């Protein structure tokens, strides 16, 4: 009985916390779409470019309202 909590409640909280953590990590990876490939030759200093691919695809032209 960790912390004065019954084992059943403790295991429910532990499993729900683990599930929420894994789901959050998955959502972040879907949104940002990181490039997880490992290059053969490491880039020289200043050559590494990082972009948010998910954000780049969703970018729209601003909608201007006509009043």
Image (cartoon, grey):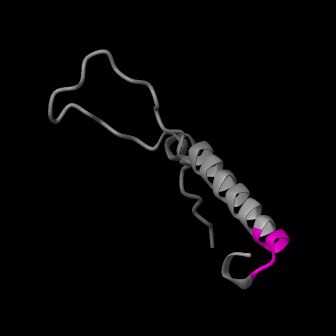
Q: Is residue 66 left or right of residue 19?
A: left
Taking depth in this image into account, of 28 and 11 the one nearest to the observer is 11
> Which residue is farthest right?
8
Question: Is residue 61 depicted above or below 6 in this figure?
Answer: above
**Quarter of the view holding residue 49:** top left
The chief SS type of the magenta part is helix
Taking depth in this image into account, of 9 and 66 the one nearest to the observer is 9
The picture places residue 46, in percent across and down from the top left corner, at 16, 36
**Quarter of the view holding residue 63:** bottom right
Identity of the residue drawn at 54% across and 57% down: 62
Report the quarter where the N terminus lies: bottom right
> Which residue is farthest top?
40
Taking depth in this image into account, of 31 and 67 the one nearest to the observer is 31
Provide the residue span drawn in magenta: 5-10
Q: Is residue 62 left or right of residue 9?
A: left
Q: Is residue 16 magenta?
A: no
Identity of the residue drawn at 21% across and 31% down: 47
Identity of the residue drawn at 35% across and 40% down: 50
The picture places residue 23, in percent across and down from the top left corner, at 69, 52
Q: Is residue 21 left or right of residue 7?
A: left
Question: Is residue 17 depicted above or below 61 in this figure?
Answer: below
Identity of the residue drawn at 14% across and 33% down: 45
């Amino acid at each position: 009985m960790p912390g004065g909590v019954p084992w059943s409640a403790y295991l429910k909280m532990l499993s729900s916390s683990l599930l929420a953590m894994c789901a959050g990590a998955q959502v972040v990876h879907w949104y940002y779409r990181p490039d997880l490939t490992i290059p053969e030759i490491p880039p020289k200093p200043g050559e590494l470019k990082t972009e948010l691919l998910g954000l780049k695809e969703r970018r729209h032209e601003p909608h201007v309202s006509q009043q």
